[in-house]
Amino acid sequence: MTDLPEPRLLDRFGRVGRDLRVSVTDRCNLRCTYCMPAEGLDWLPKPEMLTDDELVRLVRVMVGLGVTNVRLTGGEPLLRRSLAEVVGRIAALTPRPRIAMTTNGVGLDRLAAPLAAAGLDRVNISLDTVDPQQFRELTRRDRFEDVEAGLKAAADAGLTPVKVNAVAMRDVNDTGVAELLQWCLDRGYELRFIEQMPLDAQHAWDRSRMVSQAEILERLGERFRLTPVQDRGSAPAERFLVDGGPQTVGVIASVSAPFCAACDRVRLTADGQLRNCLFARSEVDLRGPMRDGASDDELADLVVGEMWAKKVGHGIDNPDFEQPDRPMSAIGG
Ligand code: SAM
Ligand code: SF4
């Protein structure tokens, strides 16, 4: 087995960066209301996006700094045509990182098998409701059946455990959380709810309307017996055995119970900007120096410096909190 590189992605609070989230595109084929407006966003012009060579090079530099997990996300990662090739090239790095993807699942019915063959290990598929009509309202697209097929294909391709990410929204899908859990249990998918965060492009997030972890657990508790699982580590989801297990449900309480103290994440945007936090107000440009001829060591120094500057927490509850300028879809969720 190859020795792991000395971890160098350290911050002032003793955390170690291990988990790299790479946004491979900012484009998307859905329009989830908590994420982007109906008309979409001003997508990045192609010349500003990292090429495959640039993207893989930056991942390699970061694997050399101690990154052990790479998650491909977006926007909708399946929209990047060269995705399987990128996965294959990341899987060929030494030491090989674990490779996961967060996707809305549209098109995964065709792509799950080739991606698994290229080296993808796991997927998280976002699905907020199993009511096709509600799905259409929430995502502004009539694609529920595609996502359903994508989930099945992911399981068939061995991209397991297949995890489902859901955002509960007040007066939209909040009364359907138990039904969603039952649907996932019946199919062997691991469901995790994520509290809605102030990362929408429209800046319409309202804390007082957010469906909190406590509320989700209360609703689930009306139908299921939930027992906390104790092995959380740096995982953001608090997990619960459902009716004694072995199946579980998780809740990521990013707002009401932030897990910043255990955060091991760092993010690379599709245009080559490194962010030490989803909520960071600044980012460091890696694309510019790379295109100007920076060496791997020089790029590594920029990454190390940005990690050192990571703040203790996201500060959503601070009176001076300001939502980042980029929405989640452009940062890479
Ligand atoms: N398009 C892919 C998808 O939807 O899975 C990947 C990108 S998406 C930005 C990643 C995750 O962020 C999804 O699970 C989505 O539900 C979640 N998300 C988007 N906006 C959010 C928000 N304002 N609060 C919490 N989660 C959000
Ligand atoms: Fe697209 Fe994902 Fe945002 Fe929904 S959450 S609009 S699928 S990027």
Image (spheres, rainbow, N blue to C red):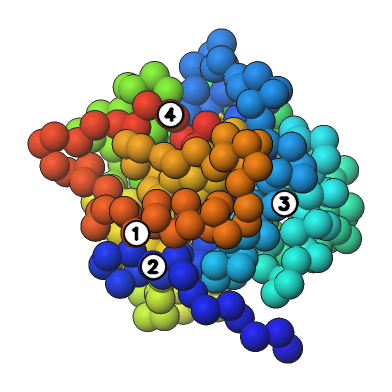
Quick one: which residue is furthest to the left in this view?
A: 319
Residue type beneath disc 2: Leu
**Image side of residue 289 versus residue 194, left or right:** right
Of the pair 198 and 26, the residue shown nearer to us: 26
Residue density around tag 3, few if under 14, some if 14–19, many if 20 or more, within 10 Å = some
Does the rendering let one see residue 316? yes
Above or below: residue 153 compared with residue 105: below
Q: Is residue 38 above or below residue 281?
A: above
Where in the figure is residue 145, as x and y percent of width and height? 74, 35
Residue 75 spot, x, y in % from top left: 60, 33
- How far apart in space, not on screen, are marks 4 and 3 (Cα)? 23 Å
Percent from the top left, x then y, of residue 57?
70, 52
Q: Which residue is mark 2?
A: 10
Q: Earlier in the sequence, mark 2 or mark 3?
A: 2
Q: CA distance from mark 4 to mark 2?
A: 25 Å
Q: Which mark is residue 56?
A: 3
* Ligand 1 within 8 angstroms of badge 4 C-beta: no
- Residue for point 26% across, 67% down: 13
Marks 4/3 in contact by CB < 8 Å: the verdict is: no
Quadrant of the drawing holding the N terminus: bottom right
Where residue 4 sits: x, y (%)? 61, 81
Which residue is labeled 1 in the image? 308
Assign a secondary structure to mark 3. helix
Do tag 4 and tag 2 residues touch (Cβ < 8 Å)? Answer: no
Q: Which residue sits at x=70%, y=74%?
A: 95
> Label 1 sits on what residue type?
Trp
Circle 1 SS class: helix
Sooner in the amino-acid sequence: mark 4 or mark 3: 3
Quarter assignment of residue 43: top right
Q: Which numbered disc, 4 or 1, marks the residue that appears first in the sequence?
A: 1
